[in-house]
Amino acid sequence: SSEGSVTGTVSADRVNVFGRIKGEIRAVTLILHPTAHVEADILHETLEIAEGAYFDGRVRRCRNVAELKRHIDAA
């Protein structure tokens, strides 16, 4: 929902953001939809940012999915 809001860490294999996230996102696949408002640091393998989405933060692409999975499993 575009009304949803999370403050903290979001960790999952696939994350679709329609609302607000402030904190950190760890995802194998991350999609920021046009209504997304993200103030977070991102660790990902695949990232898609739609036109209209707001993003402020740092992005790091994980070269080794196993490393990313460890981050996801630890959260």
Image: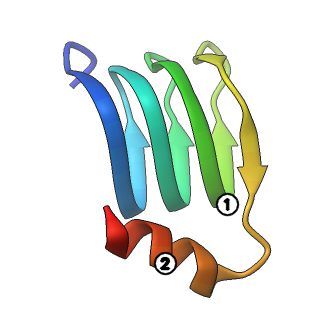
Where disc 1 sits, the SS reads: strand
Q: Is residue 63 left or right of residue 55?
A: right
Residue at the farthest bottom position: 66
Residue at 47%, 78% (x, y): give it.
70
Q: What type is the residue that disc 1 sits on?
A: Thr
Residue at left offset 73%, top offset 40%: 59
Above-or-below relation of 31 to 5: below
Vertical placement of 75 versus 64: above or below?
above
Type of the residue with mark 2: Lys
The residue to which callout 2 is attached is 69
Residue 14: x and y in percent read 41, 61
**Left or right: where does residue 58 sit relative to residue 1?**
right
Q: Which mark identifies residue 23?
A: none
Residue 75, x across and y down, in percent? 31, 61
Judging by the rendered image, the residue that carries numbered circle 1 is: 46
Q: SS class of the residue under badge 2?
A: helix
55 and 51: which one is in front? 55
* Separation of residues labelled 2 and 1 (CA atoms): 13 Å
What crowding class fits label 1: few (fewer than 14 Cα within 10 Å), some (14-19), or many (20 or more)?
A: few
- How many circles with numbers are drawn on the protein? 2
